[in-house]
Image (cartoon, rainbow, N blue to C red):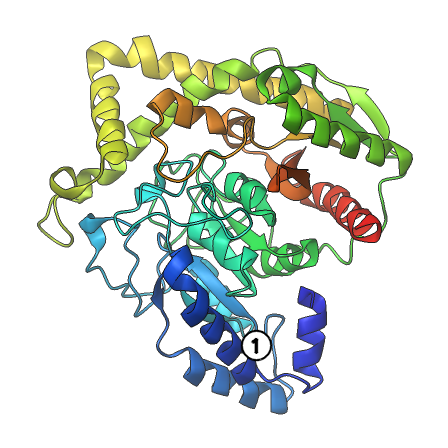
Amino acid sequence: MGTLEKIEAIRNGELSATENVELALERIRKLNGKLNAFLEINSKAMEEAGEVDRMLKAGEAGKLAGLTIAVKSNINVKGLRATCASKTLEDYVCPYDAEVITRIRREGGIIIGMTNMDEFACGSSGETSAFGPTDNPAAPGYIPGGSSSGSAAAVASAMCDLALGTDTGGSIRNPASHCGVIGVKPTYGLVPRQGLIDLGMSLDQIGPISPDVPGSVLLLEVIAGKNQAEGMMMDVERVSYGELNGGVKGMRIGVSPQFSNLTDPRITGVIEKKVEFLKDLGAEIVEIRLPHIEQALSAYYLIVSVEFFSATRKYDGRKYGKRIESVCGEEVLRRIMLGSYISRREYRGRYYQRALQVRTLIRKELSLALKQVDAIVGPTVPKLPHKLGTRLTPLEMYAYDYLTIPANLAGTCAGVVKAGEVNGIPVGIQVQGKPLGEEKILRVMRALEVESSKSG
């Protein structure tokens, strides 16, 4: 049952919010022991579902009424623990709701629980959590991708209807690709970040993960829009994308040969078939150039390490939590040490300022390319996921982010939809758009989804 069909069933009384929550809790009991997607379940979920059912009977139901929403464990949900999958915050109980949670509750969405993730969002595999790795329900035994590993796995295994993830360098799109679900990184500043425990605040963005494109559209319409109490936001009150069934006929779709140079040929083969598919649907395929895309990776990791180092100075073991350096994992400590090093005055110009210059260059190149086309398509991740427990070097792990990082550096929007499989492992196609270009990327994603379902 698709997202829209489930909403219709709930509104028609064929399925109550209480029954929907019961179904989700039963699947969690059945599957979470193996998948380790959830770190905590909302003990008040059934009570909240009862209240939504009363609202439904009174005709006061919101857009998400009765749907179960999983939340990445770096977003504050009042009364639940936002641990960031770290021993640092394992006892931190959220005293308030993040703005996106307030908006979800207002529309009748039911928070089902908090999901696992790479510790403090530092990771691309879902393996760095202090509470154990998450398995991939679409390819058991392989990484689900990170850092929003639990949210993607929860959606892929139908333990929830929709989920929130966060994306700093690909952390929604990477696991969406590996788990065969939909993930959207909105334009920077379109979705409020108040209540998010940040990794890199100039890069972070909260976004939806869903089993289908209409699900991501629905959740994005609820959480997007200006928060008057927050700086660095787009001047957009609300968004509305409709059903997105207009197709891609007449759209100009960009492709870059550099994507292929960085990507496993097996993945490239899957993506190229979808590009031909878009051409068959009436899109014009245009070759674009992104000459400095390979420099984005190193620039990103310098910038995010400095921002992360700054953000973690509050975890000193005094007011709340534990001293982060005393209890964190290897990858978190690596980024803190790197950020500390390049934050020093004598190294700032040599490393950090140059990284900011590359960021400006990437932004200009993407902006120029997106003036020529309506959207850019290509692979999401340049390589297939490794098996859980495989030891990779930091550079090998960072390489998962080659193709997703540019959108974060530029602040543009990007989404992922399943393109196919390689040896039974899902492969996602990434669709990138202009700032506030969500309607166009979602239209491309929807066209791919609809036609894939027909041929499937």
Determine if residue 186 is in view: no
Percent x, y of residue 431: 67, 36
Q: Residue furthest left?
A: 318
Q: Quadrant of residue 178?
A: top right
Q: Is residue 11 above or below residue 389?
A: below
Residue 74 shows up from this direction: yes
Tell me what residue is drawn at x 54 percent, y 27 percent: 383
Please tell me which residue is depicted at 68% across the width and 19% down the height of the picture.
Answer: 368
Q: Quadrant of residue 34?
A: bottom left
Q: Residue 231: horizontal and vertical position, in percent?
A: 43, 45
Instruction: Please identify the quadrant where the N terminus is shown.
Output: bottom right
SS assignment at label 1: loop
Residue 205 on image: x %, y %? 48, 43
Query: Where residue 235 appears, x then y in whole percent?
Result: 57, 46
Comparing 392 with 380, the one in front is 392
Q: What's the residue at 43%, 59% (across, down)?
A: 71
Relative horizontal placement of residue 397, taking residue 421 as reference (left or right):
left
Instruction: Report the residue marked by disc 1.
Output: 66
Please state which of residues 406 and 279 is positioned toward the viewer in this rendering: 279
Q: From the viewer's side, name the closer residue of 336 and 133.
A: 133
* In the displayed structure image, the side of residue 232 where residue 234 appears, left or right: right
Which corner quadrant of the image does residue 267 belong to? top right
> On screen, 35 above or below 127?
below
Q: Is residue 139 above or below residue 397?
A: below
Q: Amino acid at mark 1?
A: Gly
Pick the front one: 298 or 408: 298
